[in-house]
Image (tube, rainbow, N blue to C red):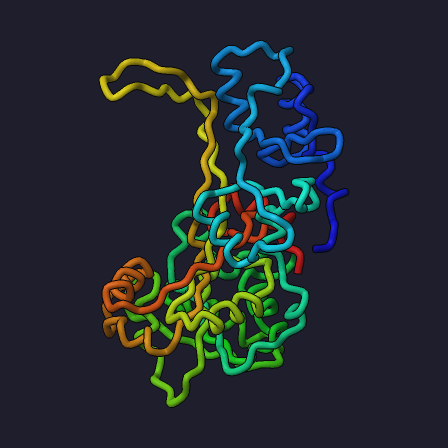
Amino acid sequence: MENVLPEYNSLLVSPNISLFKALITLKNTGKKCLIIVNKKKKLLGTLTDGDLRTLVILKKNLNQSISKLYNAKPKFYFEKNFNLEIAKKDIIKNRYELVPVVNKFRKVVDVLTWDKVFATNKEIINKKVNNCELIIMAGGEGTRMQPFTSIFPKPLIPVNGKTILEHIITKFSKIGIKKFTISLGYKNKTIMAFFKSLKLEFKIQFLIETKPLGTIGSLSLVKKKNNNNDIFVSNCDVLINSNLAEIYDFHKKHDHDLTIVAAAKNFEIPYGVCETSAKGIFKNMAEKPSYSALVNTGVYILKQNILSLIPKNNKFDITDLINLAKKKKKKIGLFPITEESWVDVGQWNEYKLAAKKLEI
């Protein structure tokens, strides 16, 4: 394995540092876990931000060393025999912030993080996707973006000088997709007029809802095709700033009927949370605790056979489709990305961050 340790040196700390210094170090790294090593960088344990918060809550002396406070039995992988696919599953299942990789002497030689493990595979960075199309779901009223959307349709909201729809189409066209369909409902004439004014290299088709059909119901209007082409589906207010060809490659490799792109998002509760026993007796208070979850980004890949599960001209949401597909024993996959790779302009607070995150 290539030794890329220098970029993670700040995560490696001595067991002799104080609890206070550990807190400062963790804050400066921007990560959520420190790796405890001896002078020869032999792995001794780990100390997470959750561990540190608990120690502070328990009123441990901030000047004492962490030598007896860290987890001495951390998760780690040996350099020679670890499997990346298994590592991915472990990290997702157990929500590991990072996992050290050690050599036979247990010296830390690498660190697996979400960013690194789910980063773009260099072998397919320029890979093109063939026999696939994109359908953008843009029929909603955009109620979360009021009062803007009472006048202007949400899909035409500008970000960095271009509408989010243009950003989405540009992103997918770069991986070779040439067929685009936009599902419309609310203010559909305004959106169609806008695209007719553009000079695009590819043709855009439109699906028109005559009544609200939910988040996925308009796909019942898609004409059946005599091929096995897969379909990318994207909400009109999100963009995945990751390698889409890698996501498609994952979908095909595992022969999924439906692949959901999910972002690992961290949530912080901005209050002190009281913990009690089963009898309601106060135990302790966690100050601004956080937790991680895999959040649906609104981007999917579907086999055409999935379309037959969507009822004709009836309201049907993506959760309905997923539950029905699961009931029908369809193969459903999950492709995890980092929170930073998910651009969401569907809410005002996220819209303000979109311009900084959007790098296409």
Task: Answer above or below: position of 219 versus 161.
Answer: below
Nearest the camera: 194 or 47?
47
Nearest the camera: 316 or 303?
303
Residue 183: image location, x then y, percent: 40, 70
User: Which residue is found at the position 59% from the left and 31% from the top?
Assistant: 45
User: Which residue is found at the position 65% from the left and 58% from the top?
Assistant: 161
Answer yes or no: is residue 212 visible.
Answer: no
Q: Residue furthest bottom?
A: 226
Residue 299: image location, x then y, percent: 46, 62
User: In the rendered image, which quarter contains the N terminus?
Assistant: bottom right
Q: Which residue lies furthest to the front in this view?
A: 105
User: Which residue is found at the position 62% from the left and 31% from the top?
Assistant: 44
User: In the rendered image, which quarter contains the C terminus?
Assistant: bottom right
Q: In this view, does 7 lie to the left or right of 215?
A: right
Answer yes or no: is residue 9 visible.
Answer: yes
Nearest the camera: 54 or 87?
87
Residue 357: image location, x then y, percent: 62, 50
Residue 335: image location, x then y, percent: 48, 59
Task: Answer above or below: position of 290 versus 248.
Answer: above
Task: Answer above or below: position of 198 versus 322.
Answer: below
Nearest the camera: 150 or 324?
324
User: Which residue is found at the position 44% from the left and 23% from the top?
Assistant: 271
Number of marks in the rendered image: 0
